[in-house]
């Protein structure tokens, strides 16, 4: 009850009364805590030796990567020589002088939307690297209509696969969906460099010999099996060959030093333990960084280590039901989809346009949006580019299904959580205690098709 100015209060005010009352408090809150679905949904493998080796069958087919292009202006565009080793025919070739000479043969060529870059049936006389833009690979369907074979974009290449052929011709047409720039190298220039460099000539010859070996549809060394025969024919022997240099994953670490003053730890622990609350929030921050590293670390992060053959571009820009269907169909047993919340919202908009209802899946008591029965988990750590594009990740998980697994080591000294320990370091002469908090982890992709990525998904909301 308020009193007029100058009038004495008749009872104790609430502000003064609070000095004798005990307030009801919350634990310290933290806005940066997320659901961390990747850490929760990955099967975790205990790496007792600190290193995880992924053994695979011997593969003869050489995968392709992305060639790096630098663009400082409309006409100031060039190839980064080292990245030419991402072309299958140059994979493993390390002579930077020769790679630089090959890079110098590329010149920029601009194109407009709708322009035909190459025509099906025409001779292959050039190799193309896309610096910027989106192009469609087209062919003639069984009944005479034009069908789209796929979309290619920044860093992709075409034409290099015909370098080992005599008088090759384009098996498809390439038409620009947007304006952009391609880097073009004449086929005869590459042949001239092969003739002038014994090292390059020997490298290309080894590549050609490898491509002529019998392989299965995944490029693995073939295993001879007889079938459909009768009687007693002679059966050829066979064996399954293995990679001689399998990839090994060492556990990475996220660390910080937590400092707590002894006076705070001794006197201010009621009703909440100050050290425990400091440690709880510190561990949350470390786990958030752990999930970011598992996605974005260039050495072992999923976004950087997914096979380029398992990356596709959206058909029209925004992520559509067709795009997710293509992504899911690239592997068996897709267990989960991972996308930025804004990408999920963009996908919902496309479903709304078509009158499609997005389903849901119950995951550990949580209702998660789902497509084709596969849950779509939100993850804000998938980056969004300045052009408002992002990626959507699909993966199969677990060792039994040759999927993606998380790696950690349980039972480490002074363990506080699985593969996370807290070690007391010292109390310095300012009476401040220091604790080293460490988390050890990594990820491994057991076979290339365990993970796929829908790239360049446009999430910008359309203007009304």
Image (tube, helix red, strand yellow):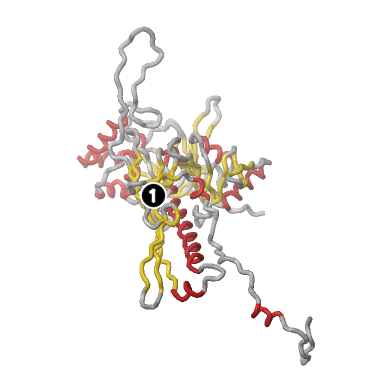
Q: Residue at x 31, y 49 (%)?
A: 82
User: x, y percentage for residue 208?
Assistant: 29, 32
User: x, y percentage for residue 298?
Assistant: 39, 52
Above or below, 300 against 332 in this view is below
- How many numbered callouts? 1
Residue sitting farthest toward the bottom: 6
The residue lying toward the viewer, choosing from 118 and 49, is 49
Residue sitting farthest toward the left: 198
Residue sitting farthest toward the top: 231
Above or below, 438 against 432 in this view is above
Q: Residue at x 64, y 74 (%)?
A: 22
User: x, y percentage for residue 195?
Assistant: 23, 38
Above or below, 403 against 241 in this view is below
**Which residue is tagged 1?**
409
Q: Secondary structure at mark 1?
A: loop
Local packing at callout 1 (Cα closer than 10 Å; few below 14, some 14-19, many 20+) is many
The residue lying toward the viewer, choosing from 433 and 362, is 433
């Amino acid at each position: 009850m308020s009193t007029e100015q100058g009038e004495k209060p008749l009872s104790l005010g609430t502000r003064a009364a609070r000095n004798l009352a005990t307030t009801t408090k919350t634990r310290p809150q933290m806005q940066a805590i997320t659901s961390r679905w990747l850490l929760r949904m990955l099967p975790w493998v205990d790496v007792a030796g600190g290193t995880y080796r992924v053994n695979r069958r011997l593969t003869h087919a050489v995968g392709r990567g992305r060639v790096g292009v630098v663009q400082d202006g409309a006409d100031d565009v060039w190839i980064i020589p080292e990245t030419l080793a991402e072309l299958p025919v140059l994979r493993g070739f390390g002579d930077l002088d020769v790679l630089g000479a090959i890079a110098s043969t590329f010149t920029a060529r601009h194109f407009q939307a709708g322009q035909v870059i190459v025509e099906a049936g025409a001779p292959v006389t050039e190799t193309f690297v896309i610096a910027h833009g989106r192009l469609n690979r087209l062919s003639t369907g069984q009944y005479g209509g034009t069908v789209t074979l796929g979309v290619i974009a920044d860093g992709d290449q075409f034409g290099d696969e015909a370098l080992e052929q005599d008088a090759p011709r384009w098996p498809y047409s390439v038409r620009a969906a947007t304006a952009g720039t391609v880097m073009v190298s004449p086929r005869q220039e590459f042949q001239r460099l092969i003739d002038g460099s014994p090292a390059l000539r020997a490298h290309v010859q080894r590549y050609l010999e490898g491509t002529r070996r019998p392989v299965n549809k995944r490029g693995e060394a073939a295993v001879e099996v007889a079938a459909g025969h009768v009687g007693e024919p002679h059966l050829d022997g066979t064996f399954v060959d293995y990679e001689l240099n399998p990839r090994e994953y060492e556990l990475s670490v996220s660390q910080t030093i937590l400092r707590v003053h002894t006076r705070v730890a001794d006197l201010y622990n009621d009703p909440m333990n100050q050290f425990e609350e400091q440690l709880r929030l510190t561990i949350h921050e470390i786990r958030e960084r752990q999930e970011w590293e598992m996605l974005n670390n260039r050495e072992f992060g999923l976004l950087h280590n997914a096979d380029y053959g398992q990356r596709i571009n959206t058909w029209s820009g925004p992520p559509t039901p067709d795009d997710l269907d293509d992504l899911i169909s690239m592997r068996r047993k897709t267990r989960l989809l991972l996308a930025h919340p804004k990408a999920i919202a963009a996908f919902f908009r496309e479903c709304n346009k078509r009158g499609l209802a997005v389903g849901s899946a119950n995951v550990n008591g949580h209702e998660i949006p789902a497509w084709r029965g596969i849950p779509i988990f939100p993850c804000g750590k998938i980056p969004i580019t300045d052009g408002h594009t992002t990626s959507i990740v699909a993966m199969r998980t677990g060792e039994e299904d040759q999927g993606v697994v998380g790696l950690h080591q349980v039972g480490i000294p002074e363990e506080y959580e699985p593969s996370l320990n807290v070690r007391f370091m010292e109390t310095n002469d300012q009476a401040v205690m220091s604790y080293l908090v460490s988390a050890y982890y990594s990820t491994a992709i057991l076979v290339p098709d365990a993970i796929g990525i829908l790239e360049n998904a446009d999430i910008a909301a359309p203007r009304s």
